[in-house]
Amino acid sequence: MKAAVYRRNGGPEVLSYEDMPDPVPGTDEVLIRTEAISIEGGDLMCRLLIPPPADGFVLGYSSAGEVVAVGSAVTGLEVGQKVCAFGQAHGLPAGSHAELRVVRPEHCWVLPDGFDPKAAALVPVTFSTAYEALFERGRLTSGDTVLVQGAASGVGLAAMQLAKKAGARVIGSASNPARFEELRRYGLDEGIDYRGENVRDRVLALTGGRGVDLAVDCVGGSLLQQLIEATRHGGHIVPLGTASREESTVDVVSLIRSNTTLHGVWLASLLHEPRVHAYMADLIRRIADGELEAVIDRVFPLADAEAAHHYAEQRGRIGRVVMVP
């Protein structure tokens, strides 16, 4: 099979498109022929910072494709089914950047007939993470106000759509304010330029000094403390990523005084849980029905993985970058 691999940490230039041995599924695994790959933030971070655990390590969390073999102990999945899938090895995103990948069946979700594999590749990370942050951790209900920091990201777009459908007021921040009008179609009510404006001050102005009920942070770094100060007494904050590549510093006293709850979410450790499988299946149905949209900014061939990763690192995009073998 062909795959994009890396042997050392660094920028997109460390990726190499090579022939690799075809993976062989174990008795409790399935083999998937890849049709689309979503480049996730964790993929970029691991390539840059975490040493590969094997020579010629195949990177990547999230993909979609067709089941071409199942292990003897696998139930509920059959050859020929189209699925979206998630995978990791040694605690790292693993396997998606290839023509074939092996995953465990609990990390697969069967797709309805005709579901676009490029859209499906986004679902395991973007929509699941957004749902977990909003409803399982953030306790979002109709009438709440939510701040989505990094609104144009894949998770941010999913979070805005889900929050708006749930009856929330949506404030979103982004690095490119020229895109705010376009973001309104995904649920944005008010936009904040987090590079040119003080997020805390702007949020408090928009909420009459009260603050938001929930802040979902897809950016991280020094802005996290501003979100804490922009969240109401007793509210919730869910940090999800470190796209800023800055270290996050939190004033614990400000959390204590405001009775604010800070929730961490690492979806990779939760995807096998039955409750997550249940809402994942429902999210797939809602996308298939046209209620929600998996937003794709640009599609690259897998052979151009270096260029795709370079583009995925640029700010100002709307949605995920996808590769196809």
Image (cartoon, helix red, strand yellow):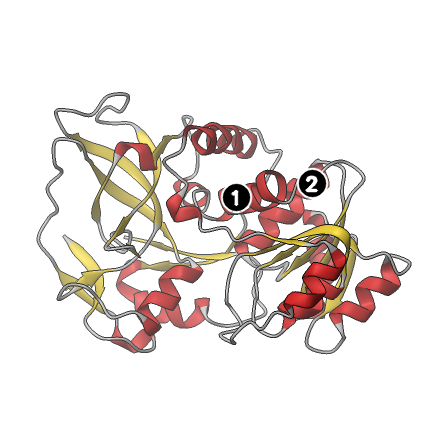
Q: Residue at x 77, y 36 (%)?
A: 142
User: How many marks can you see?
Assistant: 2
Q: Residue at x 61, y 69 (%)?
A: 250
Q: Looking at the picture, does residue 310 appear above or below residue 287? A: below
Q: Amino acid at mark 1?
A: Phe
Q: Amino acid at mark 2?
A: Leu
Residue 122 point in image, percent of width and height: 45, 47
Task: Please state which of residues 72 and 91 is positioned toward the viewer in this rendering.
Answer: 91
Q: Quadrant of residue 147?
A: bottom right
**Res. 143 in view:** yes
Q: CA–CA distance between discs 2 and 1?
A: 15 Å
Q: Callout 2: 10 Å neighbours few (<14), some, many (20+)? A: many
Q: Which residue is identified by label 1?
A: 127
Q: Residue at x 38, y 48 (%)?
A: 268
Mark drawn on residue 233? none
Left/right placement of residue 224 relative to residue 97 reads: right
Q: Quadrant of residue 35?
A: top left
Q: Callout 1: 10 Å neighbours few (<14), some, many (20+)? A: many
Task: Please state which of residues 226 and 172 is positioned toward the viewer in this rendering.
Answer: 226
Residue 308 point in image, percent of width and height: 38, 66
Mark 1: which secondary structure? helix
Q: Which residue is identified by label 2?
A: 140
Left/right placement of residue 287 relative to residue 301 reads: right
**Res. 308 in view:** no
* Disc nearer the start of the sequence (2/1): 1
Mark 2: which secondary structure? loop
Q: Looking at the picture, does residue 135 appear above or below residue 300? A: above
Please name which of the two marks, 2 or 1, marks the residue nearer to the observer. 2
Residue 280 point in image, percent of width and height: 47, 33
Residue 264 point in image, percent of width and height: 52, 53
